[in-house]
Amino acid sequence: MLLADVAHISRRVADTPSRTGKTALLAGLLRRTDPADAPVVITFLAGRLPQRRTGIDRRVLYEEVPPAAGPALTVREAHRTLDEIAAVSGKGAQARRGRLLSGLLAAARRRLRPAGRHSRW
C-alpha cells in the first residue's frame, strides 16, 4: 500500500464531519491493507510512529528535500526506513539519520506533492 493512500484517507477523515463517513473511509482503507501492514497503517493513522523514538534532530526537518526519481513510497518501505533510522547510533548518527530521512521524505514528496507547487512539504 502506498503511504500516499494512507495520507489521502487521513486527510479525508479529518475533513469528514460524520462518524459514519469517517468509519466508512477507514474501513475501506483497512480492507485494502495487507494484513502484514495493518499495524503500521493503524499507527500512522493515529499520528504516531511504531518506532516511538527515532532520534531525528528537528533541524533536519527544515532542510529542502528534492523529489525522488524512484518509485512511490509504500507503507512497508517507510516503516523499514524508520526502523533503520531508529537503529542508527554512534559517531555520525545524526548525519546518517538525516540522510535516511531525506531519502524517505523525497520518496514521499514525489507522490504527495501537488504538481506545480514549489512550497516546502
Image: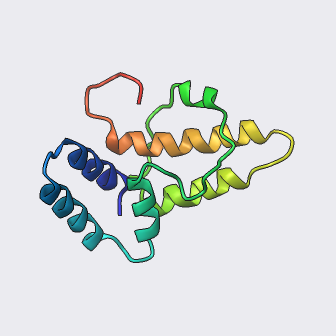
Query: Residue most toward the right?
Result: 91
Q: Residue drawn at (14%, 45%), measured in percent from left and top? A: 17
Q: Nearer the viewer, residue 51 or 60?
A: 51
Q: Considering the image in quadrants, where does the N terminus appear?
A: bottom left
Q: Position of residue 34 (x, y in %)?
A: 37, 74
Q: Nearer the viewer, residue 23 or 6?
A: 23
Q: Nearer the viewer, residue 21 or 85?
A: 21
Is residue 116 rendered to the left or right of residue 20? right
Is residue 91 rendered to the left or right of residue 18? right
Q: Position of residue 27 (x, y in %)?
A: 23, 67
Q: Position of residue 40 (x, y in %)?
A: 46, 63
Q: Residue drawn at (60%, 53%), measured in percent from left and top? A: 52
Q: Using the image, determine if residue 38 lies above or below residue 87.
A: below
Q: Considering the image in quadrants, where does the C terminus appear?
A: top left
Q: Using the image, determine if residue 109 lies above or below residue 87.
A: above
Query: Residue most toward the top?
Result: 119
Q: Using the image, determine if residue 39 lies above or below residue 51.
A: below
Is residue 25 rendered to the left or right of residue 40? left
Query: Residue most toward the bottom?
Result: 35
Q: Using the image, determine if residue 92 lies above or below residue 62.
A: below
Q: Position of residue 5 (x, y in %)?
A: 29, 55
Name the quadrant containing residue 67. Answer: top left
Query: Which colour style is shown?
Result: rainbow
Q: Residue drawn at (68%, 52%), measured in percent from left and top? A: 86
Q: How many marks?
A: 0
Q: Residue drawn at (29%, 49%), measured in percent from left and top? A: 10
